[in-house]
Image (spheres, rainbow, N blue to C red):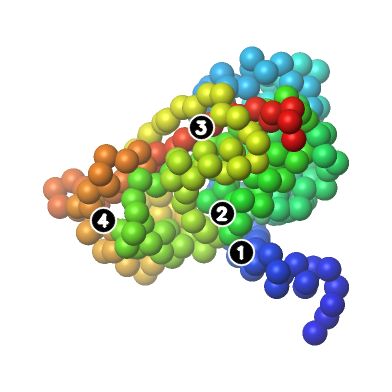
Amino acid sequence: MNIDGAEVRQTTDGYRAQVSRNQLRFATIAESYAGGQARRLDVELLAELIRPLEFERALDVATGTAAAAAVAAKVGVRPKIIGVDSSAQMLAQARANGEVDSVQLVVALVEELPFADGTFDLVMCTRALHHVRRPEIVVAEMARVVRPGGHVVIADNVTGLSGAAHEQFEQIQRVRDPGHATTQTEQQLLDLLRDNSLDVVEGHRTTSFRPLDEWLHDGGAGPAESAEIRRQLLPLGHIDDDGNFGTSVVLREGEVAGLQQAMSWIKAQRSDAI
Ligand SMILES: C[S@@+](CC[C@H](N)C(=O)[O-])C[C@H]1O[C@@H](n2cnc3c(N)ncnc32)[C@H](O)[C@@H]1O
């Protein structure tokens, strides 16, 4: 066995296999992501959340094709924006988009941010925490690199399901997209922030209908997987989530029409006490 640092981490931290799954996945779908999913980010809501912060130095972790970094570049004051991602192909798509010329793009893991403590005024992560195996490591890294008094913004899909129904839906999402890890509840996102001395200062909830065919296409599922997913999603359309905020399966005339996708947007501030 090789004893270099990377292998030691693989066995102790347990997230490298998931990183590899995502690298493979996003290398394959980078171009279609740039033309589709990237454009569905609610850029107005993100701008509303970060504009009042009047930041200069911002970091977008798991930036992908830099959709959120582009918003920061527009609304920051003398902005100096860095985006990091594990996928060189996603960053290549970002570079091909003239809107992010001013953003510095770096290949790095969100679990191992290559920046000194307290470097940034603002650290963001949009639509990516459900792809990582150890979200607690990622949020701890985000908290580490934001300066005392600086802000962290997390926006992600959330689940309102629990127990067997939650597990079943997560399993379906991994079939659709092998880079999917686990969807958090909104409460889990709040806890991750608070566990890292990040005080929640603002929150928003959004929902959007995703037609099933579009959702399957975005994930890159082939025809056989799509048919199986369609079949497995059907019973979840009848699940009662006790009114919890989270993504649900939408049925029409007895068939799965799509998903009502729920996202939580949370802004938090690093307390000076760290
Ligand atoms: C769904 S995309 C979101 C991209 C972007 N934040 C957005 O809102 O459009 C998820 C991104 O997370 C990246 N990613 C997944 N795991 C990562 C890791 N451990 N370190 C860095 N990037 C990672 C993927 O390469 C992909 O670009």
Q: Tell me the mark number nearer the camera, choosing from 2 and 3.
A: 3
Q: CA distance from mark 1 to mark 3?
A: 24 Å
Q: Which mark is residue 131?
A: 2
Q: Residues within 10 Å of mark 2 (few under 14, many from 20)?
A: many
Displayed quadrant of residue 225: bottom left
Residue type at mark 3?
Trp
CA–CA distance between discs 4 and 3? 25 Å
Q: Are marks 1 and 3 in contact (CB under 8 Å)?
A: no
Amino acid at pointer 4: Leu
Residue closest to the eye, 196 or 94 = 196
Q: Which residue is mark 1?
A: 18
Q: Are marks 1 and 2 in contact (CB under 8 Å)?
A: yes
- What residue is at 70 percent from the left and 69 percent from the top? 12
Count residues near mark 1 (Cα–Cα under 10 Å), then give few for <14, some for 14-19, many for 20+.
Answer: some
- Percent across and percent down for residue 243 are 27, 39
The yes-or-no answer for disc 1 within 8 Å of ligand 1 is yes
Above-or-below relation of 134 to 225: above
Q: Earlier in the sequence, mark 1 or mark 3?
A: 1
Corner quadrant of residue 268: top right
Which disc, if any, is residue 80? none
- Compute the Cα span from label 2 to label 3: 17 Å
Comes first in the chain, label 4 or label 1: 1
Q: Amino acid at mark 1?
A: Gln
Q: Which residue is mark 4?
A: 236
